[in-house]
Image: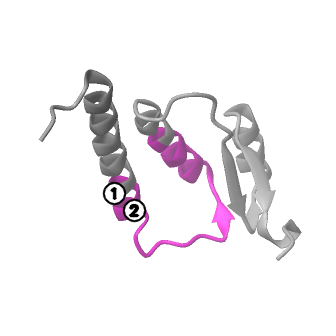
Amino acid sequence: MAELTEAERRTEQRLTRLEAVVEELAEAQKGESKTQLKKTNIDAFIRFIKKAESVLEGEKMLIAVTYQASLLARKYAEQKGIKLYFSYELPL
């Protein structure tokens, strides 16, 4: 079997790290569903994105979908560069 090139090896390492980050997020969110977005949810999302940035290159578009959010949470999301959508506004 042929040796991996350096680029292939780096890609494999990035994919392994990405899988670990996704598994961590899935475990943290397991069985959890929220209708109201809170500042703590936004902070948790930002922590996840910071971990994922080490693996995912390029520009990211940060969005959150919720049923409702307080004015404080809406402003906080905007300050953090997260575009907020309300589920009842999305066409099904």
Q: Mark 1 points at which residue?
A: 23
Contact, mark 1 vs mark 2 (Cβ under 8 Å): yes
Instruction: Give the quadrant of residue 4.
Output: top left
**Residue plotted at (40% across, 70% down):** 30
Residue 78 coordinates in the image, percent (x, y): 76, 38
- State which region is magenta: 24-48
Residue sitting at x 58%, y 28%: 58
| Relative to 39, residue 80 above or below | above
Label 1 packing within 10 angstroms: few (<14), some (14-19), many (20+): few
Q: Mark 1 falls on what kind of element? A: helix
Q: In this view, does 71 lie to the left or right of 64?
A: right
- Front residue of this view, candidates 19 and 9: 9
In this picture, is 67 found above or below 80?
below
Residue at 68% x, 53% y is: 64
Quarter holding the C terminus is bottom right
Q: Main secondary structure of the magenta part?
A: helix
Describe residue 66's horizontal placement relative to residue 89 as left or right.
left
Q: Determine the secondary structure under disc 2.
A: helix
The residue carrying mark 2 is 26
Callout 2, which amino acid?
Ala
- Residue 29 inside the magenta-drawn segment: yes
In the rendering, at what x and y percent does residue 83 appear? 76, 45
Outermost left residue: 1
